Amino acid sequence: KGVRSQSQQKEHIQEDVSTRTNLPPYVEGSVHAILICHIPKLRWLTKYQSLYRSINIKMTWWSEDDVSAIFKPQISGTKSDHRQQPSITVKYYIRSDLKQFSKYLTDAAELLLKVCDADNNRI
């Protein structure tokens, strides 16, 4: 059982978005690295600022069949929505070596982020 230094304790990231996806998707094996995605705030252009007060951001990686994570960030310039507890950080386990993961990212057509109204799920 190892003891963590103070610098290691400060680096501990609290994940609050759950996912069952490994990266690349559908790859099994030992964990080679961890990728942390963090979306704490969304800032609208001025013309959209008053339209949406509560949103979800749905993340889908290349080759995934479905959404792997749903973020619920704070919207800049608005008061926090009491109905929506912020969910802003997800941890992905990289299950290929880093050279293969780099190739996956290079080959990936896109990382899809859909911004949806939390009330009606409209994109």
Image (spheres, rainbow, N blue to C red):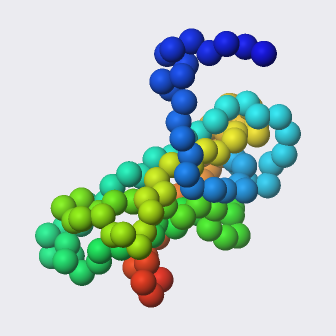
Q: Is residue 106 visible?
A: no
Taking the image as shown, residue 10 lies to the left or right of residue 102, namely left
Does 22 appear above or below 6? below
Q: Quadrant of residue 123?
A: bottom left
Q: Nearer the viewer, residue 72 or 24?
A: 72
Residue name at image x 72 percent, y 49 percent: 22
Taking the image as shown, residue 119 lies to the left or right of residue 26, namely left
Q: Residue furthest right?
A: 29
Taking the image as shown, residue 1 lies to the left or right of residue 117, namely right
Residue name at image x 46 percent, y 47 percent: 38
Does 109 appear above or below 92? below
Q: Quadrant of residue 97?
A: top right
Does 122 appear above or below 88? below
Q: Residue furthest left?
A: 46
Residue 70 at x, y = what percent? 54, 64
Residue 89 at x, y = what percent? 51, 49
The quadrant in which the N terminus is found is: top right
Q: Is residue 65 visible?
A: yes
Does 94 appear above or below 46? above
